[in-house]
Image (spheres, grey):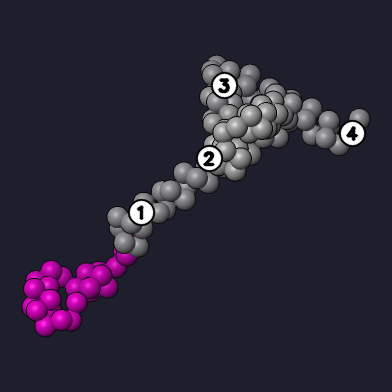
Amino acid sequence: MGFLQTVLNSGMGTMGGVCAFLPYCEFIMLGLKIVMLLFIIGWVRGHLGGGLVATMVMLFIGYLALFQYFAIFGPLTIVYLLIIMGVGGAITDLAFGGGHYGLGPEARGGDQRGVLSRMQTGEV
């Protein structure tokens, strides 16, 4: 038995063991496959456009990722989703918080009492 087949068999056994404890595992896997399909469609359309060749590539990659090698691509998709959500959360925190957590008002530029006078003198 080849290395890839061994990895696939062990991955399916592991996912099957996890699915035995989750009552809605089929729905979770279906949702994950739909997300993977949307990722594949977006990636192929972004790189190849929307012609016949792009459709054939979508079908081929979709078949491989969703049915043949899902034990490999499923966990990678979960990791990718977690990275996307984590980076998005960090960017949101920096955008709205300014990255000055735990610092006093003087570290953020002082309080707001002298803003008008600083704007008039050109210090801002």
Q: Amino acid at mark 2?
A: Leu
Q: Which sits in the foreground, 110 or 62? A: 62
Q: Earlier in the sequence, mark 1 or mark 4?
A: 4
Q: Residue at x 83, y 30 (%)?
A: 5
Compute the Cα span from label 1 to label 4: 46 Å
Say few, some or many: other residues with alpha carbon within 10 Å of mark 1 (under 14 / 14 to 19 / 20 or more): few
Mark drawn on residue 30? 3
Question: Magenta-highlighted stretch: main secondary structure?
Answer: loop
Name the residue carrying label 1.
93
Compute the Cα span from label 2 to label 1: 18 Å
Do callouts 2 and 1 mark residues in contact (Cβ within 8 Å)? no
Q: Which sits in the foreground, 46 or 23? A: 46
The reply to whether residue 16 is visible in this rendering is: yes
Q: Amino acid at mark 1?
A: Asp
Q: Amino acid at mark 3?
A: Leu
Name the residue carrying label 4.
2
Magenta range is 100-124
Compute the Cα span from label 2 to label 3: 15 Å
Whether the magenta-drawn stretch holds residue 117 is answered as yes
Q: Secondary structure at mark 3?
A: helix
